[in-house]
Image (spheres, rainbow, N blue to C red):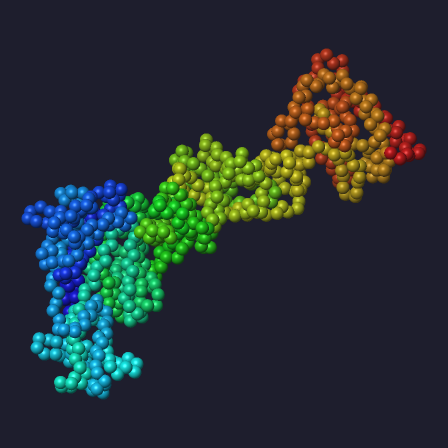
Amino acid sequence: MRLFVFTILLAVLPAVSTKSPIFGPQDVSGVVGNSVSVTCYYPATSVNRHSRKYWCRQGPGSLCTTLVSSNGYISKEYAGRANIINFPENNTFTINIAQLTQNDTGSYKCGLGTSNRGLYFEVSMEVSQAPEFPVDTHVYTKDLGRSVTIACPFKKENAHSKKSLCKKIGQTCELVIDSTEYVNPKYKDRAILFMKGTSQELFNVNITHLRHSDAGLYVCQAGEGSSADRNNADLQVLDPKPELVYRDLRASVAFDCDLGREVADVAKYLCRMNKETCDVVINTLGRRDPAFEGRILLTHKDDNGRFSVLITGLKKEDAGQYLCGAHSSGLPQEGWPMQAWQLFVNEESTMPPSRSVVKGITGGSVAIVCPYNPKESSSLKYWCRWEADGNGHCPVLVESQGVVDEQYEGRLALFDQPGNGSYTVILNQLTTQDAGSYWCLTNGDSRWRSTVELQVAEGERKPNLEVTPQNAIAVLGETLTLSCHYPCKYYSHEKYWCKWSNKGCHILPSHNEAARQSSVSCDQDNQVISMTLNPVSKNDEGWYWCGVRKGQDYGETTAIYVAVEERTGGSRQVSPVDANAPANVAPQEEVVDSGVSDNENKAIPNPSLLEEEGEINSVGDQAQENRAAVDAGSADEQKGHSKILFSTLVPLGLVLAGGAVAVWVARVRHRKNVDRMSISSYRTDISMADFKNSRDLGGNDNMGASPDLQETALERKDEIVTTTEIATEPEESKKAKRSSKEEADLAYSAFLLQSSNIAAQVHDGPKEA
């Protein structure tokens, strides 16, 4: 019996020919006086949309006589009862034929262009006479495997009489069921007789799991003899009419099954016709055809028995006939509901080719391009991982509105590329657990869903991109530079750094665009691209990617996490990065490595002769030509008489003015040579004209100080004052009668003598400054 069922289904679902991209039903049937509609599909191209569509009847040889065309032509045979309608938005055209006659039986072609181009699909039409039924016969038309309820009216006088239903077989009527609870073995567990509510004029017979053998004429009877009530019912059991499905190569297709509430709790399946059998592709019991591994899903739509089977990455061998059904075994069985599809796969696909297999290595990365309908650039894009457990499911890992699965933090991003009909998904820090099948989806045209298999090899080679330092810990307020090393094969590629977030990976702007923001610079000779964060803020913490691309084609990437910490107390060593920090960054701790304080980048303040135990403050004056620090007194005087020394500032200014006149000649001789000077390790040239008079900076004039003057190192017990050496000029005037050093010594001696006299006077009677 099962073989018989599939033999009939094969007659309904003949083999699909893929010689032509035009697709339509191969068999059409009708009844005299009724009408039929034939829908033909064609590839979605501009030429096809505007080409002539026709319906012709095949004659002897290769002759095909046009009966109706989209140019407005209608033959005399079809005048007044046929038309052809083009639906370019669906890439279909439909031929409608009314008032069918038996003469319409024959072979036809639906095609594009002219009948000799080969762009057509052959259709066989059969028109039969309507069956003759007795008067007052009610006709029931049901699909194979479904159920039917036959209503049987009767008069009140037969309300208490025996009720029955029988089926006409030749001249006899075989009893099916009666009100004495008799059931024919052929209908055991399938037929039931009942009365609804309080009605005393109608009984019903329900038959489930209809078979082809159930078709025929039935007679309802209430009562006996000549007073009995009899009614006729004709039951027609139809094969599942196949739904035509036209899809492009590499596209996806969904088979939506609605089998009825009566099988809501029964196992479901999808099978593909193969000669005399229907091989299961997938069912709800966990069975799955290996040919569809990674690209098929079965999902329940609701509790009423409806479910859907989605197949992605269509191949030309996927074309054929499919059935969906329900049975406790998960296999096709006669008498159970079924739905049919006839799938045609157009090899002249409008979908762009894409890689079905992508290979990566552990620790490396992959960039997967996902196509979508270019007309739906604003649609949401998704990327999910196909799971093989059960019926298969595909949890979303990333989507274009900024949702990333937390397990993929820092290593997964979606780059939408509006305008070119594709988006790119990048997955880095690969592990062997990442191997599997992934789907590209949108909330738009479901036909553009695609699948890709990711293969991850272990230990074959190292990734091409490498970031140093690998342990990136940034200090708040300071500068961090990361270097990304790449091979020469990426020389012509665009290199970039980006900051990862759950909304993607934002490409970092250039230094010229925003001084505070991250800056990117590249040294092509050393094959290094560097990223600098200056100054580091708490918001800079997170994942950073280094990658390469050509235009919109993304290539390899590597990721690194940057942690941001606050600076701890104590001294630290100055790094080359710190030496390049901008001058307006205020230091947060003292640096004791190069002997240069960070404060040297600023103007030297007015000396403060204050001292506590265990603490020494340097005192100095800012000059236009150099920075010479002069000690204001001995260590004993600083400790015991800070107030007295402060009162000497006014007389000291007079002494310095006199000293300036004494060494004026030395200043003139060296002014030509002292034009620019190097300050600390910032490698910045500063013009002498940029310095203001030292009085503006809060210090005393020191115009007469020699460029060769150095700070004197003072040692007091275990306390040390760091000395700073000022750059000396390479040449001196040849006409000078005495050296600049001698002149400076004279000026300095005069200064000490005057200071001693003033101090002695202050001891005798200090005055308020």
Q: Where, quadrant-wise, is the N terminus in this rendering?
A: bottom left
Can you give x and y, in whole percent of width and height, for residue 100 in the image? 14, 58
State left or right for residue 455 relative to residue 692. left
For the residue pair 413 and 307, the one nearer the viewer reads as 307
Q: Position of residue 670 (x, y in %)?
A: 71, 18
> In the shown orientation, is residue 6 left or right of residue 748?
left
Q: Which residue is drawn at 18% across and 46% down?
A: 69
Residue 423, quarter of picture? top left
Residue 49, can we see it? yes
Which of these two is toward me, 632 or 531? 531
- Residue at 93% from the left image edge and 33% from the top image edge: 764
Residue drawn 68% across and 26% down?
Answer: 690
- Taking depth in this image into account, of 437 and 139 the one nearest to the observer is 139
Q: Which residue lies furthest to the right in this view?
A: 764
Q: In this view, does 746 lie to the left or right of 415?
A: right
- Residue in the picture at 18% in, 68% down: 237
Kindly tell me whether residue 249 is visible in this rendering: no
How many numbered circles are shown?
A: 0
Locate residue 569, reporting x and y percent. 66, 46
Q: Which image quadrant: the C terminus?
A: top right
Q: Is residue 525 above or below residue 286?
A: above
The percent coordinates of residue 259 (x first, y second) are: 27, 66
Q: In this view, does 47 lie above or below 435?
A: above
In the rendered view, tell whether residue 273 sits above or below residue 570: below
Name, please, the residue furthest toward the front.
80
Splitting the image into 4 quarters, where does residue 278 fall? bottom left
Q: Is residue 529 left or right of residue 313?
A: right
Q: Which of 626 and 260 is in front in this view?
A: 260
Judged from this view, the residue extending furthest toward the left is: 60
